[in-house]
Structure formats: structure tokens, C-alpha cells
Image (spheres, rainbow, N blue to C red):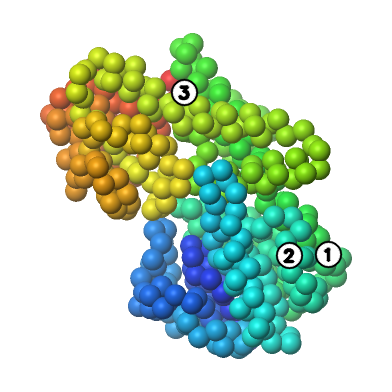
Amino acid sequence: MMAEAEAEVTVGFAGLDHLGIVTAVGLAEKGFRVIAWDPDPERVGRLAAGDPIVSEPGLDELLFVNAVRTTFTTDLADLTNADMIYVAADVPTDDNGNSNLGVVTDLISAVRDILSESALLVVLCQVPPGFTRGLGLPESRLFYQVETLVIGRAVERTLSPERFIIGCAQPSEPLPPALDVVLSSHGCPILQMRYESAELAKISINCFLVSQVSTTNMLAEICERIGANWSEIAPALQLDRRIGVHAYLRPGLGIAGGNLERDLASVAEISAREGIDAALVDACRRNSAWRKDWLYRVLEGTVLRDLEDPVIAILGLAYKENTGSIKNSPSIALLEQLEGRRTRIHDPVVPASVVPWAEHTQTALGACGGADAVVIATPWPEYRDLTAKGLDAAMRGRVLVDPFAVLTDACPLDHGFAWYRLGV
């Protein structure tokens, strides 16, 4: 029965950025007929040809095997055949985390004009509390769905979500059949709540993540100063039921990517407007800025202080592995501080053109040639193939800045390297 219901429901998408592409193809994988619209003909053409556009593990294969169930189009009228339409654009943010909702409102305006009398509109973009209710559309056909994709794991989380959070006008009433069938096909809990609660739920999730990140980074830095090792402490926290095995306990280089920064900005704005003490947000922002500067502080205390004209290799430009995004990337922040110095860069996805003044190399080991210091700023899996022996032969100096301990299997200390890691 479920397979028959899925075949009868057609799901539309307006906006084909990272969020829209992954979610659309994910629903096609579940058996639904998908019509995906975007006004950009180049984007639509590439997707129709099987080019996933964005860097996301597993997306190219998913796009290929579901081509027969997915229609990419620039014709807005095609969406009139959909039983429900997701507005699914990525929401851009500025350097302070403030959202530009123009792309969302433009898509909603376009869809509103062609929305059939029975079709549902589901806002999937992240928007501030009050946005969905303020659209003025019939509440019986208007919903907000919290997106919880994680870049680098988006396909996995789309196909196997932990739960769905749905904002609606009447949380106690059953969901419309089309939306219920789409969500139920994933076999996970569905939490219905008022629009504002759902919009704030996403912000709440990220605020808790930020608090874990900030606490972990603070304690990891204490480890670095007093001779403790954070990797020895983390298992003790994971075995505490009040914290748990899935707690975010990996030290990092501050907050990056844009999503967490946006939610901190939202909490700060709401708190200022409502007269609420949000000092915690300010503390998290300060901790993030301090931690993001960790890479430069290590270089400043070693090669920048001791050598007149050091050669520095930066491996990784993306803010995290398995993405091409450099939004608030610690690596890019470091390169801004190093501009004018002899610097070589490598990233398997991010184009070298984002840092035109630096020397680009085709391989990671090539970037290390003649370097006095190597910084592994992004823990791309391929960097784990680097060996201490290979680095020893390629480098001029002996400084390895490896915040995420990518080279754990390489035993750099046994080859005389000064090996700098977070939390050690």
C-alpha cells in the first residue's frame, strides 16, 4: 500500500541549491515522482545531465539511479502537477551570520502564483520565527519543515533522518495525506508543533551544538596547556548518560559553514528585541573567534618567529571535509593572515582561484615540497595517505600543524617532527 501511495504523490521543489537537490533526489529514491524547478537554465541543464553541481558524497550515484523519477525544469508551470511543493533554497548569510531571505521570498512569490487549489506549500528553508505564519497563505495548506542536513553527510541524513519536525497551524490535527505519506515513508518520528516552535526548534538544535563545540574547544585548549590529552577524556564523557556517546566532543577550529553562525545571530536578535540576556551567545562567538586563530598562533610561535622567509603549505581550503564550501573557513582566515608570504595550497574540491595569490599544486605532497611547515587545515580523507617518510623527504622543515590528528597512523614524532594537534 505504501508503494502505491508513493507512486500517486508527486512532490515539487522550488530552488535547487544544496538543500533542494539532495532532498529532491532523496525523495525520488523513496519512490516518489519529483518535479524540481529552478529559474537558472545552466543549473537545471547540468542536473538533468547527471551533474550533481554540489560536492556531496553519494549524490552523483543517487542522481543517476533516480533519473527516471526526477524531472528538472525551468518551466514554473510544471509545478502545477505537484501535490505538494517544497521551497528549498539555501539561505545566504553575511559574515555576521545575518540571513538574506530575499531568495526565499522570491521563490514563494513565484510558487504562490501557480499553486493549485489543493496543493500544499512546505517551507524547507531555514527562516526566523514568525516567517511562515506571516506569509498569509491558507494555513490548512501551509507547513514549515525543519531541515537538518549536515554537509558531507546530507545524503545519509536525507534517506535516514532521526525525526521530522513540522510546523503547522493546528498541531493536534492529522497532516494532509500527501505530506503524511512523504514523511511516513522514512519510518521515523514526526513531531508536529506550531509554526514558531518548529522555526525555533532548528535554532535550538544548533545552539546546543554550539555550546558543545565551545565547551569542547575550551577544555581541549586547557589540555594543550597543562599536558593532558583530550582524546583520553572524551570517552569518559561519552559514557556519562547525561552527555552520551553522540555528544560533539571533537575539538575544532571554531564555528564555520554559516548555519550555526546564522542561528547565533537569530538568538542575539530575538534576545535584544525581547530584552533577554544572551551573554552565552557572545561568549560562544568570542570562543569561536579565538579558536579559529589557533592555526596562526601555532605558526607564529614556530616558523614565523624563527625563520626569515618560511615556506608554508596549507592542505585544505574547505571549512570541513566532503564539501566545496569555504564559508567562514579557518583555512581561508589563516591565508588572509599569511598573504604576502610564500604559501602553497591544495584542496581536492575547492578551486585554487579562491586564493589567487598563493601557489596551487595538483597534489597534497606536491604542496609540501620544500615547506618549512605543513598545515592540514581540512581533514580530507585523502590526506590520511600522507606518510611521515614521504613528508620527511619532501619538506625542508619539521613543523606539522595537524589540528584533527589526520596523521595519527604516520607516527610523525618518530621522524623528528614537531606535531601540533588540538587537545594535546
Establish if 324 lies above or below 289.
below
Q: Please, which residue is most extreme toward the top here?
A: 226
Mark 1 is surrounded, within 10 Å at the Cα level, by few (under 14), some (14 to 19) or many (20 or more) other residues, namely some
Alpha carbon separation for disc pair 3 and 1: 45 Å
Alpha carbon separation for disc pair 2 and 1: 14 Å
Name which residue lies at 43% across and 26% down. Answer: 294
Instruction: Say whether marks 3 and 1 touch (CB < 8 Å).
Output: no
Mark 2 is surrounded, within 10 Å at the Cα level, by few (under 14), some (14 to 19) or many (20 or more) other residues, namely many
> Which amino acid, mark 1?
Pro
Image spot of residue 65 (x, y percent) = 41, 75
Mark 2 lies on residue: 132
Mark 3 lies on residue: 423
- Whether residue 226 appears in this view of the structure is yes
User: Left or right: where does residue 377 sit relative to residue 40?
Assistant: left
Mark 3 is surrounded, within 10 Å at the Cα level, by few (under 14), some (14 to 19) or many (20 or more) other residues, namely many
Image spot of residue 320 (x, y percent) = 42, 44
Name which residue lies at 60% across and 49% down. Answer: 98
Q: Quadrant of the C terminus?
A: top left
User: Left or right: where does residue 139 sit relative to residue 407?
Assistant: right
Mark 1 lies on residue: 171
User: Dot 1: what SS?
Assistant: loop
Closer-to-camera residue (356/46): 356
Q: Earlier in the sequence, mark 3 or mark 1?
A: 1
User: Dot 3: what SS?
Assistant: loop
Name which residue lies at 73% across and 51% down. Answer: 200
Closer-to-camera residue (269/346): 269
Alpha carbon separation for disc pair 3 and 2: 42 Å
Of circles 2 and 1, the one toward us is 2
Name which residue lies at 42% across and 58% down. Answer: 56
